[in-house]
Amino acid sequence: MGGIERIAVIGAGTMGSGIAQVCAVAGKQVTLIDMGPAQLESARVRVQDSLRRVVKKGGLTQADAEAALTRIHSAPRLDAAADSDLVIEAIFEKESIKAETWIQLESCCKPQTLFASNTSSISITKLASVTKRPERFIGMHFFNPVPVMKLVEVIRGNKTSPETTAAIVALSKELGKTPVEVNDYPGFVSNRVLMPLINEAAFAVFEGVATAEAIDEVFKLGMAHPMGPLTLADFIGLDVCLDILNVLFEGFGDPKYRPCPLLKQMVAAGKLGRKAGEGFYKYEKA
Ligand code: CAA
């Protein structure tokens, strides 16, 4: 399997733009694809801001940052991924929408192109099954903020080949990340362990055990977490947390994953966390 030089990133949200940035900084040619022109424009601004922060703290020269930016090409159509060695999909976290996107990508990409999903909990084996290349399909789970967080959780689906895994592990290292290989079961490792912590913290608020602030202080000061679980839940998005808990609950059929009623109610009320201006905390701006 040759090296990965041309990468298409599908979805220009927070994760997609972060992934495009780290790939471009590593010297890859990146096509960032999104149907929405406004999303593509805000992705460019986000990448510029992030590169500025990296330059400011000496992680990159101004010239290298500018060169990286020129390696990111925006496109509004999926067939712009046709010549890529790898497609990384980072779109909305809904299985049917992801599956539909992969069916379209299957029809426009060359057969040897590797397919990777940045899903946080949807089964890689299921997504791979809608394509004709399950052995070249893998999970490549990045963490927000992508330019800062060192981990890539590499998820092997039931039919993912060792060659595909090796290529993605090698690429993750080229991107300056540390890949950790896991198998495809609900929530993988990251969210199988993180979401019950967040859910339990929500139950502690729900039952009046302590305030959100108190719970977060316990984890920041007692366990040296950079953010307490409820600040982190707001950062991730409470809707995303609820979706992942539902995947765990349905996937294992175990009541220990039942989402906290408070979390469900907050999502129903539109209190989705930082992006909505309110979650467990209030924020100045969405
Ligand atoms: N681009 C580039 N650099 C950035 C950045 C970005 N988008 N965001 C932050 N940084 C840099 C800053 O420049 C700063 O650098 P220095 O320390 O060298 O000055 C550093 O990161 C820290 O940033 P700040 O000082 O602004 O703020 P902070 O110290 O509070 O750190 C944080 C912010 C890195 C987000 C930190 O709070 C943290 O690590 N939080 C936990 C994040 C986390 O757990 N993410 C995973 C979420 S789960 C997920 O993504 C996947 C899922 O499936 C749900």
Image (cartoon, rainbow, N blue to C red):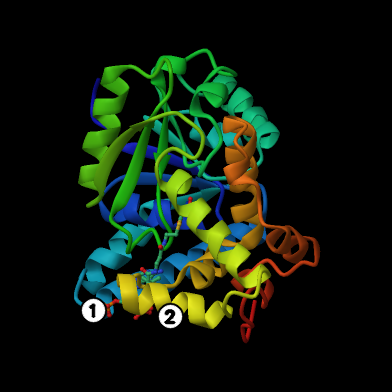
Which is nearer the eye, 198 or 139? 198
Viewed as shown, does residue 280 lie left or right of 268?
left
Of labels 2 and 1, the one closer to you: 2
The residue sitting at 50% across, 44% down in the picture is 120
Can you tell which quarter of the image residue 255 is in?
A: top right
Position of residue 131 measured from the top left corner of the image (x, y, whole percent):
55, 18
Disc 1 secondary structure class: loop
Q: How many marks?
A: 2
Position of residue 219 measured from the top left corner of the image (x, y, whole percent):
39, 72
Which is nearer the eye, 161 or 204? 204
Can you tell which quarter of the image residue 116 is in?
A: top left
Q: Give the quarter the ligand 1 occupies.
A: bottom left
Viewed as shown, does residue 30 lie left or right of 177?
right
* For residue 15, above or below residue 164: below
The answer, for residue 8, to whether it is visible in the render is yes
In what quadrant of the picture does the N terminus appear? top left
- Mark 1 close to ligand 1, CB under 8 Å: yes
- The crowding category of the residue bearing disc 2, from other C-alpha atoms within 10 Å (few below 14, some 14 to 19, many at least 20), is some
Residue sitting farthest toward the right: 269
Which amino acid type is shown beneath numbered disc 1?
Answer: Lys
* For residue 50, above or below residue 39: below
Which is nearer the eye, 220 or 40? 220
Viewed as shown, does residue 51 lie left or right of 239?
left
User: Which residue is tagged 1?
Assistant: 57
Residue 217, which numbered label? Answer: 2
